[in-house]
């Protein structure tokens, strides 16, 4: 198992790679986020998906090559089976209110605004790192983690309210934003960044207000997607535990596992 400890000096590293650079002191959550990114960056190198000369970031922003390699790594190593029709039917029967027309959605978001002169590549990498971080929390800690991230990172006034947007209808949203929120079954943090005319959004669906219930055949695709998302979140968190269990970690409290349960 990895040697995981909190040092009195606050020094933090993953396999000797420092997590805190020239951008000043980091809190525990920021260190944990950087540790997860560094674990994935090093795993991408080990899998020959990223050149070993890729420099570790000193400000938390991965190189574009590292971001692409991590995406390829997750596609390769975090694989979940397709849900069976039987499992989909059970899920639909237990969550009929989620599969309806005319629904309202209560959501919150963290906006990374694209403004004139902004480094879009760096912005996207920060948004992706934030998405990864909020998806990997235990359910009990997820609410506080999202609200804190929204308060400190979001470029939307809703950040002061933890990113809460209240109840939304599709007509009240930008079309590209509505396409990601409505007509789907997910409840929880969406597994991908939402792109809109305003920028990049990390979005969490908190509730869906039931409309007209739809038969299983009409929503089978949405049901399958919901089950895949649940399985993916579990597999991603387990994969990070595996990587932590194989690494030497100092200064960061990361859950570690000795057995590689994710292949």
Image: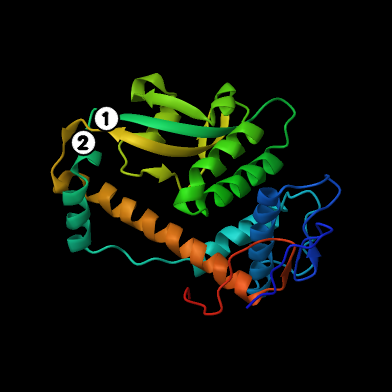
Q: Which colour scheme is used?
A: rainbow
Q: Which quarter shows the N terminus?
A: bottom right
Q: Neighbour class for label 2 at 10 Å: few (<14), some, many (≥20)?
A: many
Which circle marks residue 103 in the picture?
A: 1
Pick out the residue farthest to the front.
8
Residue 247 in the figure: left or right of residue 58: left
Q: How far across and how far down the image is residue 4, in percent?
A: 69, 69
4 over 126 or under it: above or below: below
Residue 144 in the figure: left or right of residue 247: left
Residue shown at the point (18%, 43%) measured from the top left? 96
Residue shown at the point (56%, 65%) measured from the top left? 240
Q: How far across and how far down the image is residue 49, in percent?
A: 64, 68
Which circle marks residue 100 in the picture?
A: 2
The local secondary structure at tag 1 comes to loop
* Location of residue 206 (image quadrant): top left
- Residue 64 visible in the picture: yes
Q: How far across and how far down the image is residue 99, in percent?
A: 22, 40
Which circle marks residue 79 in the picture?
A: none
Residue 216 in the figure: left or right of residue 7: left
Q: Neighbour class for label 1 at 10 Å: few (<14), some, many (≥20)?
A: many
* Location of residue 162 (image quadrant): top right
Residue shown at the point (49%, 62%) measured from the top left? 236
Residue shown at the point (56%, 34%) measured from the top left? 110
Q: Along the line of sight, which residue is nearer the eye, 11 or 107? A: 11
The local secondary structure at tag 2 comes to strand
**CA gap, disc 1 to disc 2?**
6 Å
- Residue 112 visible in the picture: no
Q: How far across and how far down the image is residue 246, in percent?
A: 63, 76
Label 2 near label 1: C-beta < 8 Å? yes
């Amino acid at each position: 198992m990895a040697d995981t400890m909190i040092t009195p000096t606050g020094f933090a590293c993953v396999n000797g790679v420092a997590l805190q650079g020239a951008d000043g002191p980091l809190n525990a959550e920021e260190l944990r986020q950087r540790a997860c990114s560094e674990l994935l960056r090093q795993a991408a190198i080990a899998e020959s998906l990223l050149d070993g000369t890729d420099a570790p970031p000193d400000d938390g922003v991965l190189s574009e090559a590292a971001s692409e390699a991590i995406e390829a790594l997750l596609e390769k190593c975090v694989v979940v089976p397709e849900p069976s029709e039987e499992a989909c039917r059970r899920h639909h029967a237990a969550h009929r209110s989620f599969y309806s027309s005319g629904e309202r959605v209560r959501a919150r978001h963290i906006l990374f605004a694209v403004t004139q002169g902004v480094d879009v590549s760096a912005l996207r990498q920060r948004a992706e790192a934030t998405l990864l971080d909020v998806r990997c929390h235990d359910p009990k800690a997820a609410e506080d983690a999202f609200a804190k991230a929204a308060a400190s990172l979001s470029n939307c006034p809703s950040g002061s309210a933890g990113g809460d947007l209240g109840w939304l209808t599709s007509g009240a949203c930008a079309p590209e934003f509505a396409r990601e929120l409505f007509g789907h079954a997910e409840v929880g943090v969406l597994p991908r960044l939402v792109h809109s005319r305003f920028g990049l959004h990390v979005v969490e669906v908190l509730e869906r207000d039931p409309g007209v219930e739809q038969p299983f055949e009409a929503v089978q695709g949405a049901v399958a997607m919901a089950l895949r998302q649940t399985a993916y979140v579990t597999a991603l968190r387990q994969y990070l535990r595996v990587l932590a269990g194989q690494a030497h970690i100092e200064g960061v409290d990361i859950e570690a596992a000795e057995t590689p349960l994710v292949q």
